[in-house]
Image (cartoon, coloured by chain):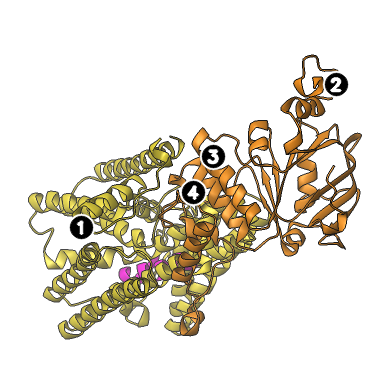
Chain colours: A orange, B yellow
C-alpha cells in the first residue's frame, strides 16, 4: 500500500457503493489518485471498473460514498460537476467528429470568439485556436500530428486518441480518466499513447487508466488498483509486483497457491 | 505503417498544390472543381445541340429560373449538414407564396408586409418541424413528409375556388423584373472581387503574422482568380442581355450570409459537429436540440423566401406552386454539388452550384424540346450518379481511416 496520507491525494473516494437492482456493482470501494501519478484500474469484466469511473465522471451517481477532491469533501452529481472540479474523462469511443479538423475537435463546444468588432458578428477566432492547438500538442510531445487542419477522420487510431486526450486537457483538469486508451491500437500507436500518458504524469496530473492490457499497465502505471466482484481486492506498487500476482488478484486465485510462481518461491 | 506518419503540410510549389489537391479529393473536398467540370460538360453538350443555349438571353433566363430553387437549396444545405432532411420545403414555399398572394391581392396588404408575413409563416412551420423532431424524436423525414401533404392541403384551402392569383406589378414581381444598368453591374462585380481578394489576402497575412502555415500563394491566386472570373462572366453575360438581375444579387447575398454563418460562427461549427457525430457534440456540451430547431426554422424560412421569388418570377401563384419537381431539384442540387446526404459535409455554395447544374440540364432539355418522360429520367439518373459518387468518396474516406 502507498504510504501517502489521504489528504495529499488529488482525488480520494471512500466506501463507494452502487447497486443495479439486486446486482451489487460496487461495495465499499476506496480509490485514490495523487498528483503526478498514474493509477491503473484493472479487473475482469463486471468487476466494477466502468461503474467506478462513471461515478467519478458524474455520468452515473453512486448510492453511497464520500468524495474528496484536493482534501475537501465534494459531491459529483453531473458531468458538469466533474468538469468544474477539474476531472476530465476520455471515453473509449473518443467522441470525435470525423468531419471536422483537429482544431475544431479540440475546441468543440468551447470555440474562441474573435475580439473587437468581429465579436458582434460571432466570428470564431480560428488563428488563436489553431495556435493554441499547436502549442498544446507540442507541450504534450505529440509529434505525429503536424497539420492540425486535417480532418480527424483521416487520422490513425493513435492520433485520434492523442486528439481526444489533448481535448480533455483544454479545460486544464488536474485528474484525467482514460477508458481503455490503448484498446484496438497497433504496437507503435500504443507506444505513442503510453508516451503521452507519461507526459501527463510529468505535467503533474493525476491519471487513472482503465485497461485490460497488463503489459501496458506495467509499462505506464505507478500503482495498480485491482477490482474484483465490486470490491477492491488488491493494490500494488508496480515496482514490487509480478504480473502473476496481479492476474491472481484479478481472477481471485489465492496468493502463494499458484504453483511455480517465481515471486512467491523466492 | 504509413498511417502513422503525419500528413505532410503543403509546402508551396506545384508539388505542394498537387498533394493538397490529392488530399482534398481523398477527403471529398474537391467538390467545387468537379462541379465546374460537370457544368462545362453540360454546357458544351447543349451548346453543340442548340447554339442558343449559351446566348446571353438564355443564360440570364437560367439565372432567373434558378433563383427560387437556389434559395430553397440554401436552407436544404443547412438541414443536410445536420444529417437531417426536410421534404416539406417545396410545399412550404408554395403555401407561403400563396398566403403572400392572398394577402396582397385579396386583402390589400402592402406587398412588403406580405413578404414579411410569408417569411414569418415559413419560420413558424420550421419551428414546428424542429419541435416535433426534437421533442418527440420523430425522424425528420416523417415529420416533413406528413407536413408536406398538410401544407399542400392548406395551400389549396388558402387559394380557394379560383386556384390562381395574379400578382400584377408591385414590389414582389419587381424582385425578379429589376435589372441593373451595365455600369452598376460592373460596380457590383468590382466590389465583389475586391471583397473576395481582401478577405483572402487579409486572412493569409493574419495567419502569416501569427506564424501559422499559410496556403501557397499560387493556390490562393488560382482560387480568387476563378471566383473573380465567375463574377466578371456573370456581369458580362447579363450586361449583353437585360443587365444584372436584382434577384441574382439577392441570392448571392443570402448565400454569402449563410456561408459565413456555417463556416465562421460557433452556431455553424455546431451544425457541422452534430451532422458528423451528434453524440460527440452532445458530450461537448452543445445543446443539440436547440441547434436542430433553429436549423429547421432557417430552412423553412429560406423555403418561404424561395417561394416568394418563385411567385415573383411567375408573376402569379397557383395550385401547383411549390409542387412538381421543385422539392427534388432543391435537394438534388446541393447533393450533386458535393453536400453530403449523410450530414456534416458540404457548403452553402453547393446550393448555388447545384442550382446551376440542375438548372442547366432542365433548361437545355427544354430548349431541345425533350419530352417530360426523358427529362424526368435524365434528372433522376444524374441524381443517382451524384449520390453514388458521394457514397464512394465516403467509403474511401472510411477506408483511409481504418488502414
Q: Between disc 4 and disc 3, whose residue precedes?
A: 4
Q: Between disc 2 and disc 3, whose residue precedes?
A: 3
- Please tell me the numbered disc located at residue A98: 4
Q: Is residue A146 above or below residue A265?
A: below
Q: Nearer the viewer, mark 1 or mark 3?
A: 3
Establish whether labels 1 and 2 are both on one chain. Answer: no
Q: Between disc 2 and disc 4, whose residue precedes?
A: 4
Indicate the quadrant containing the N terminus of chain B: top left, top right, bottom left or bottom right: top left
Q: Circle 2 sits in a helix, a strand or a loop, which is it?
A: loop
Mark 4 vs mark 1, CA separation in Å: 29 Å
- Residue B11 seen anywhere in this rendered image of the structure: yes
Relative to B68, is B398 on the left or the right? right
Mark 4 vs mark 3, CA separation in Å: 23 Å
Q: Residue A57: where, in percent of width, then height?
A: 75, 52
Report if the CB atoms under discs 4 and 3 are less than 8 Å apart.
no
Establish whether labels 2 and 3 are both on one chain. Answer: yes
Magenta span contains residue B304: yes
The residue pinned by badge 1 equals B13
Report if the CB atoms under discs 4 and 1 are less than 8 Å apart.
no
Relative to B250, is B262 on the left or the right? right
- Please tell me the numbered disc located at residue A53: none
The residue pinned by badge 3 equals A191
Mark 2 vs mark 3, CA separation in Å: 33 Å
Highlighted magenta segment, given as a residue range: B300-318
Crowding at label 4, few (<14), some or many (≥20) Cα neighbours within 10 Å?
Answer: many
Q: Residue B393: where, in percent of width, then height?
A: 36, 42
Magenta span contains residue A125: no
Mark 1, chain letter? B
Amino acid at each position: 500500500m502507498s504510504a501517502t496520507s489521504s489528504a495529499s491525494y488529488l482525488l480520494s473516494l471512500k466506501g463507494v457503493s452502487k447497486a443495479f437492482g439486486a446486482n451489487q456493482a460496487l461495495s465499499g470501494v476506496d480509490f485514490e489518485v495523487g498528483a503526478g501519478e498514474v493509477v491503473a484500474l484493472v479487473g475482469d469484466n463486471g468487476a466494477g471498473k466502468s461503474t467506478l469511473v462513471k461515478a467519478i465522471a458524474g455520468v452515473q451517481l453512486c448510492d453511497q460514498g464520500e468524495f474528496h477532491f484536493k482534501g475537501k469533501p465534494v459531491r459529483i452529481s453531473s458531468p458538469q460537476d466533474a468538469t468544474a472540479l477539474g476531472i476530465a474523462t476520455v471515453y473509449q469511443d473518443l467522441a470525435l467528429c470525423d468531419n471536422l479538423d483537429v482544431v475544431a475537435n479540440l475546441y468543440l463546444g468551447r470555440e474562441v470568439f474573435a475580439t473587437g468588432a468581429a465579436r458582434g458578428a460571432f466570428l470564431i477566432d480560428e488563428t488563436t485556436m489553431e495556435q493554441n492547438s499547436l502549442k498544446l500538442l507540442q507541450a504534450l510531445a505529440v509529434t505525429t500530428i503536424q497539420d492540425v487542419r486535417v480532418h480527424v477522420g483521416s487520422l490513425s487510431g493513435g492520433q485520434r486518441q492523442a486528439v481526444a486526450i489533448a481535448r480533455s486537457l483544454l479545460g486544464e483538469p488536474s485528474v484525467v480518466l482514460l477508458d481503455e486508451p490503448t484498446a484496438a491500437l497497433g504496437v507503435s500507436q500504443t507506444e505513442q499513447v503510453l508516451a503521452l500518458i507519461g507526459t501527463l504524469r510529468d505535467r503533474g496530473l493525476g491519471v487513472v487508466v482503465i485497461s485490460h492490457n497488463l503489459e501496458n499497465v506495467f509499462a505506464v502505471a505507478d500503482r495498480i488498483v485491482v477490482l474484483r466482484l465490486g470490491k477492491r481486492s488488491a493494490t500494488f506498487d508496480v515496482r514490487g509486483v509480478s504480473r502473476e500476482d496481479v492476474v491472481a488478484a484479478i481472477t481471485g486465485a489465492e496468493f502463494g497457491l499458484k504453483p511455480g510462481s517465481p515471486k512467491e518461491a523466492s | 505503417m504509413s498511417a502513422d506518419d503525419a500528413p505532410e503540410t503543403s509546402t508551396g510549389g506545384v508539388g505542394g498544390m498537387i498533394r493538397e489537391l490529392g488530399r482534398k479529393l481523398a477527403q471529398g473536398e474537391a467538390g467545387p472543381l468537379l462541379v465546374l467540370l460537370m457544368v462545362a460538360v453540360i454546357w458544351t453538350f447543349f451548346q453543340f445541340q442548340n447554339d442558343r443555349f449559351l446566348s446571353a438571353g438564355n443564360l440570364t433566363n437560367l439565372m432567373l429560373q434558378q433563383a427560387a430553387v437556389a434559395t430553397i437549396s440554401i436552407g436544404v444545405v443547412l438541414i443536410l449538414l445536420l444529417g437531417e432532411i426536410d421534404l416539406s420545403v417545396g410545399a412550404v414555399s408554395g403555401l407561403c407564396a400563396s398566403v403572400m398572394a392572398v394577402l396582397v391581392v385579396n386583402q390589400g396588404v402592402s406587398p412588403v408586409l406580405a413578404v414579411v408575413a410569408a417569411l414569418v409563416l415559413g419560420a413558424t412551420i420550421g419551428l414546428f418541424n424542429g419541435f416535433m423532431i426534437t421533442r418527440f424524436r420523430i425522424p425528420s423525414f416523417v415529420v416533413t413528409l406528413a407536413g408536406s401533404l398538410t401544407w399542400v392541403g392548406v395551400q389549396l384551402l388558402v387559394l380557394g375556388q379560383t386556384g390562381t392569383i395574379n400578382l400584377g406589378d408591385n414590389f414582389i414581381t419587381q424582385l425578379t423584373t429589376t435589372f441593373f444598368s451595365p455600369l452598376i453591374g460592373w460596380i457590383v462585380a468590382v466590389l465583389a472581387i475586391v471583397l473576395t481578394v481582401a478577405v483572402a489576402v487579409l486572412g493569409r497575412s493574419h495567419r502569416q503574422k501569427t506564424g501559422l502555415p499559410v496556403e501557397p500563394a499560387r493556390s490562393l491566386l488560382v482560387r480568387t482568380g476563378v471566383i473573380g472570373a465567375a463574377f466578371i462572366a456573370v456581369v458580362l453575360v447579363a450586361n449583353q442581355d437585360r443587365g444584372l438581375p436584382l434577384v441574382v444579387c439577392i441570392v448571392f447575398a443570402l448565400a454569402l450570409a449563410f456561408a459565413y454563418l456555417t463556416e465562421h460562427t460557433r452556431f455553424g461549427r455546431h451544425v457541422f459537429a452534430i451532422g458528423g457525430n451528434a453524440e460527440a457534440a452532445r458530450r461537448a456540451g452543445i445543446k443539440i436540440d436547440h441547434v436542430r430547431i433553429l436549423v429547421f426554422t432557417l430552412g423553412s424560412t429560406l423555403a418561404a423566401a424561395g417561394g416568394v421569388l418563385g411567385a415573383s418570377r411567375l408573376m402569379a401563384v397557383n395550385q401547383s406552386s411549390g409542387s412538381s419537381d421543385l422539392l427534388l431539384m432543391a435537394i438534388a442540387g446541393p447533393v450533386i454539388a458535393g453536400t453530403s446526404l449523410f450530414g456534416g459535409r458540404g457548403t452553402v455554395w453547393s446550393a448555388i452550384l447545384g442550382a446551376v447544374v440542375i438548372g442547366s440540364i432542365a433548361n437545355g432539355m427544354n430548349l431541345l424540346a425533350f419530352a417530360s418522360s426523358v427529362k424526368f429520367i435524365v434528372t433522376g439518373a444524374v441524381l443517382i450518379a451524384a449520390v453514388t459518387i458521394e457514397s464512394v468518396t465516403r467509403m474511401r474516406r472510411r477506408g483511409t481511416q481504418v488502414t
